[in-house]
Image: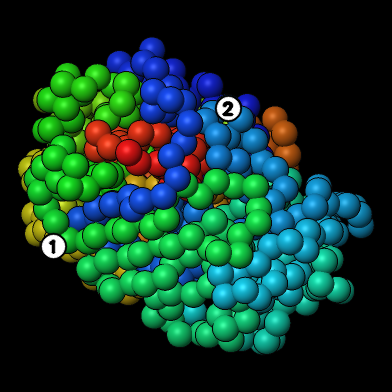
Amino acid sequence: MDKKLWLSIVASAIGASLLVAAATAAPAKHKASTGHAAKGGTFVVEFTTDVDYTDPALDYLSTGWEMMYATACKLYNFPDKEAPAGSQLQPEVAAGLPVISNGGKTYTMKLKNTYKFSDGTKVTAQSFVDAFNRDANPKLQSPSTPFMDVVAGSQAVVDGKAATISGVKAPNATTLVINLTKPAPDLLSRLTMPFFQAIPKSLATNADPNGVLTYAGCGPYYFSARTANKSITLKKNPYYKGGRPANVDTIQVNVGNSLDVIQQNVESGNSDYAAGGIPPTAWATLSAKYGVNKGRVFVKPQLGVSYLAMNHDRPLFKNNPQLAKAVNWAIDRRAILNQGGFLAGKRNDQILPPGLPGGKDISVYPLQVTPGTIKVAQKLAAGHTGDGKAVLWTSNRAPAPQQAAIYQYNLKQIGIDVSVQQYARAVQIEKEGTRGAEFDFTTEGWIADYADPYDFINVLLSGDSLHEANNNNVAYYNSAKFNKLMTQASNLSGSARYAAYAAVDAGITKEDPAWAARSNFNDRIFVSARTKGFTFQPVFSFDYATVYVQ
């Protein structure tokens, strides 16, 4: 999921490193022959499996955040534009940039008074205070808490020692003050995350860990209806007076069809956007038929990484870096990526993706398996495989089952018999994020919340932020050495920050791997012929607010 202040600086670099054959194609935004956006109608979206939550404190899937980009209003946000303009953070509800004082530890923001929720109530500074306090409520176990680590008083609420965050206050309806425990160069970028959107009073006191299905939104749209595992409906916010577009009247999300059926529906025009993907083998055929970035099929690079997480809470990998290294030498990254189909991404073996500040190619592990790499893996694994049995969790959606079979074969070569358990994607995320879950491996991927190494290193690998549920650190990695180095890196800024994070990436990858990183990936989009325009927003991907249909 997603992003940062200086993303605009790196946006041009990531295309060259990830996009491969699509690098010279036309831009993702396309228009009808008149050049004018048509208003109205219903845009039909298909998911194979449901999102985890539509609750802003709990949702943490990229497909959910695509929708929340259309339903939320935030202090700061990214505009409805293509890269590079779409990567440049700007005030939204905030009236301008904050006044920063107290040595970089106090942010005072003046807010506009023109925003309203879809129930007609006004958005005030308290609407944002309520969001912070709800995020920190320990009953929710929100995955937002690692991003509040610098906010004064947030940890006391997370620990159940206080009811409200002392460092977030609303002196009046149009003034918000945030006090930090230390300067945070990336604070404004963190505030662009959907966790920190304004929330209505009806949601402020709701601490149901299962989340809410619908609520009043303050963006161009709001969640008007949801039937779990069946459908989600977004409607226009009738009180929205902000500057963002809202072209279609309704965004209708249907859940549950197979990838083959979704492809057929979008090709025929019965649906408009294959948000759940299509069969991996179909991308080459459709790209040849329609071209890439020319109207129906779009391919765009993302700051993200796919990886095989190794559960360090379990006996197999606890204090066992030799086996973790052996896994990295054994997996066939080329074969695994090939299962994703045409232009799925690019092989890699480390934590930080190319194009991210701090990302530096270190080439530690092989990107293709050979008899020689297997011999190295076997030597590293010798005497470190325990009882030789392991459990792998993965999604039940292609290409995950096929990739799991490759992992099984690869790991058998180093003496590990792997049993595979498949789940709906949202179920996999919920289960693996619960501490004590009985898996040794789980297949995962991560898209930058904002373009800073903190979002990959600290958020995904710091043992200091582990809790009982909704963990992002599904490797349950907790190294005293690297926890300290991560914290030290987060306190730096500029080139020193990026150099420190590059060193942490190299250290973990070489000395004590948490994962077997395997590839960086592209966002591949397939839309109907009646989809006559949309913007590929470089931070939040498909921009529902901009789409229009014939």
- As drawn, the residue found furthest toward the front would be 34
x then y, percent, for residue 281: 11, 33
Label disc, if present, on residue 29 of the rendered structure: none
In the picture of the structure, the residue carrying the numbered disc 2 is 84
Q: Quadrant of the C terminus?
A: top left
Most foreground residue, 114 or 91: 114
Tell me: 59 left or right of 232: right
In the picture of the structure, the residue carrying the numbered disc 1 is 421
Residue at image x 55%, y 46%?
Answer: 245
Q: Is residue 327 above or below residue 311?
A: above
- As drawn, the residue found furthest toward the top would be 24
Residue at image x 51%, y 85%?
Answer: 207
Most foreground residue, 377 or 55: 55
Residue at image x 36%, y 72%?
Answer: 225
Which three-letter amino acid code belongs to the residue tagged 2? Pro
Residue at image x 43%, y 39%?
Answer: 38
Tell me the crowding category of disc 1: few under 14, some 14 to 19, or many 20 or more residues within 10 angstroms, Cα based. some
Which three-letter amino acid code belongs to the residue tagged 1? Gln
Most foreground residue, 463 or 540: 540
Most foreground residue, 433 or 398: 398
Secondary element at image label 1 = strand
Tell me: 283 left or right of 510: left
Q: Quadrant of residue 468?
A: bottom left
Mark in the foreground, 1 or 2 = 2
- As drawn, the residue found furthest toward the right would be 102
x then y, percent, for residue 467: 47, 73
Between the C-alphas of marks 1 and 2, the distance is 41 Å
x then y, percent, for residue 262: 15, 47
Q: Quadrant of residue 476?
A: bottom left
Secondary element at image label 2 = loop
